Image (cartoon, helix red, strand yellow):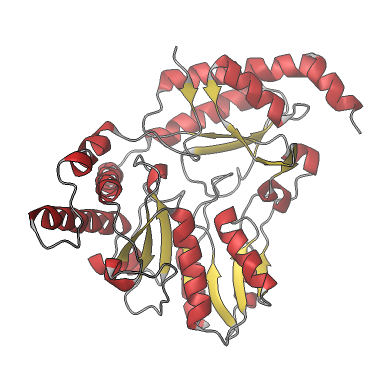
């Protein structure tokens, strides 16, 4: 069997239909959307169509609420910094303790500028402390930003309810939906969410394109200034091929959600059940929380995550760990640490993330490979070295 790719929360393969849609805008319809001739007009129309397609996925009320960006990180930074600059008298922000680095880094920069950052904790299952979130809201808060789905555990947060609470306190609300868009149904027009970020390469579009949803009437200060593009909200010539691709991917994702069924979730649950049955001591993180259906985060006591990932890679299974490479050493991710896991256990977290392209045969094969690799590491020299390490 070919290599088995179970790292779709890191990036997805571009859908061939998406690639087919974007290719003409590289070599044939290559005009600048701002140009007043046929080439420019064709490009501008393609951007309009893509904007409408993304609006359909988001359930937004207006096409104009879709702002194209270079990806999720730019959208996150734009949302948070815009909210802070729009209300300079407010010197506090609220985030969760398990946000993606794209949000955490911006929060740290604001903290260095004198902002107070409220980091709302999660429990051992990765569930947000909603009472603490509500308590942190006040007229001093410039923005509250809580992710829709956690990128490591898949835990879903009640963002619609959080947005309602934020609005009741007069606080704008942003959510990083990079791991939710295309996986859960979105109906932003029916919520009080002011801003939302998504990334194309997490839903089978290419890298380098994303969206900031900006609810009509929301105070806004652009991060990137320049030309009039995106109604003056994001300067720079539009990346037409990537925008067309994102529109096509959004339309495919919307159709898949509308069709119903959850084959990805069934396959994730099959992988989870087999590993719990075949690997003694294996544990699922956020098992008690609502989770996005494609994500499975597990720990295998007695096994180092870095070693297991290397063995899986050699055996033809691509997964990822809940750890970040820090100065040549494996540092535990902040997500399992926030959930209360000891550092040694947190360093062993492995994330398997599926997509609509994942097959039942791949899941069965992967389960057997993971179980065999864990057994080999537990009985081999890697475990003895880990036990002797201080």
Q: How many marks?
A: 0
Compared with 263, 382 (above or below) is above
Q: Residue at x 45, y 69 (%)?
A: 223
Q: In which quadrant of the rendered view does residue 273 lie?
A: top right
Viewer-side residue, 232 vs 192: 232
Left or right placement of residue 54 versus residue 5 in this view: left
Viewer-side residue, 33 vs 285: 33
Q: Most extreme residue toward the top, as rendered?
A: 1
Compared with 77, 82 (above or below) is below
Position of the C terminus by quadrant: top right
- Residue 98 drawn at (x, y percent): 63, 55
- Residue 375 drawn at (x, y percent): 71, 16
Compared with 63, 340 (above or below) is above
Position of the N terminus by quadrant: top left
Q: Residue at x 53, y 77 (%)?
A: 84
Q: Residue at x 27, y 59 (%)?
A: 55
Viewer-side residue, 31 vs 341: 31
- Residue 231 drawn at (x, y percent): 27, 71
Q: In which quadrant of the rendered view does residue 189 lie?
A: bottom left
Q: Residue at x 49, y 18 (%)?
A: 364
Left or right placement of residue 250 versus residue 274 in this view: left
Compared with 13, 382 (above or below) is above
Left or right placement of residue 170 versus residue 286 in this view: left
Any part of residue 306 in sight: yes
Any part of residue 62 in sight: no
Q: Most extreme residue toward the left, as rendered?
A: 38
């Amino acid at each position: 069997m070919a290599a088995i790719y179970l790292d779709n929360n890191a990036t997805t393969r571009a859908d061939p239909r998406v690639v087919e849609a974007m290719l003409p805008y590289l070599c044939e319809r290559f005009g600048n959307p701002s140009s007043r001739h046929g080439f420019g007009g064709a490009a501008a129309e393609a951007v309009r169509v893509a904007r409408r397609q993304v609006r359909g996925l988001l359930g937004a009320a207006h096409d104009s609420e879709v702002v194209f960006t270079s990806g999720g990180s730019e959208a996150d930074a734009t949302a948070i910094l815009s909210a802070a600059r729009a209300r300079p008298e407010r010197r506090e922000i609220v985030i969760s303790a398990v946000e993606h680095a794209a949000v955490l880094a911006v929060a740290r920069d604001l903290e260095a500028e004198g902002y107070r950052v409220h980091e709302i904790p999660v429990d051992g299952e990765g569930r947000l402390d909603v009472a603490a979130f509500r308590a942190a809201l006040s007229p001093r808060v410039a923005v509250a930003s809580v992710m829709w789905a956690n990128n490591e555990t898949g835990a879903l947060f009640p963002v619609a309810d959080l947005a309602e609470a934020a609005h009741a306190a007069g606080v704008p609300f942003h959510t990083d939906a990079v791991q939710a868009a295309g996986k859960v149904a979105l109906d932003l027009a029916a919520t009080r969410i002011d801003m939302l970020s998504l990334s194309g390469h997490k839903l089978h579009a290419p890298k380098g394109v994303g969206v900031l949803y900006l609810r009509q009437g929301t105070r806004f200060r652009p991060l990137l200034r320049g030309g009039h593009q995106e109604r003056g909200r994001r300067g720079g010539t539009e990346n037409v091929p990537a925008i067309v691709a994102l529109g096509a991917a959004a339309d495919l994702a919307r159709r898949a959600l509308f069709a119903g069924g959850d084959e990805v979730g069934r396959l994730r649950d099959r992988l989870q059940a087999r590993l719990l049955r075949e690997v003694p001591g294996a544990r699922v993180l956020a098992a008690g929380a609502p989770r996005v259906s494609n994500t499975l985060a597990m720990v295998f006591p007695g096994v180092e995550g870095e070693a297991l990932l290397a063995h899986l890679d050699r055996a033809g299974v691509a997964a990822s760990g809940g750890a970040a490479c820090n100065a040549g050493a494996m540092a535990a991710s902040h997500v399992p640490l926030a959930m209360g896991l000891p550092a040694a256990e947190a360093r062993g977290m492995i994330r398997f993330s599926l997509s609509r392209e994942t097959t039942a045969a791949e899941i069965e094969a992967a389960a057997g490979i993971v179980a065999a690799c864990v057994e080999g590491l537990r009985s081999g020299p890697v475990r003895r070295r880990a036990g002797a390490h201080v």
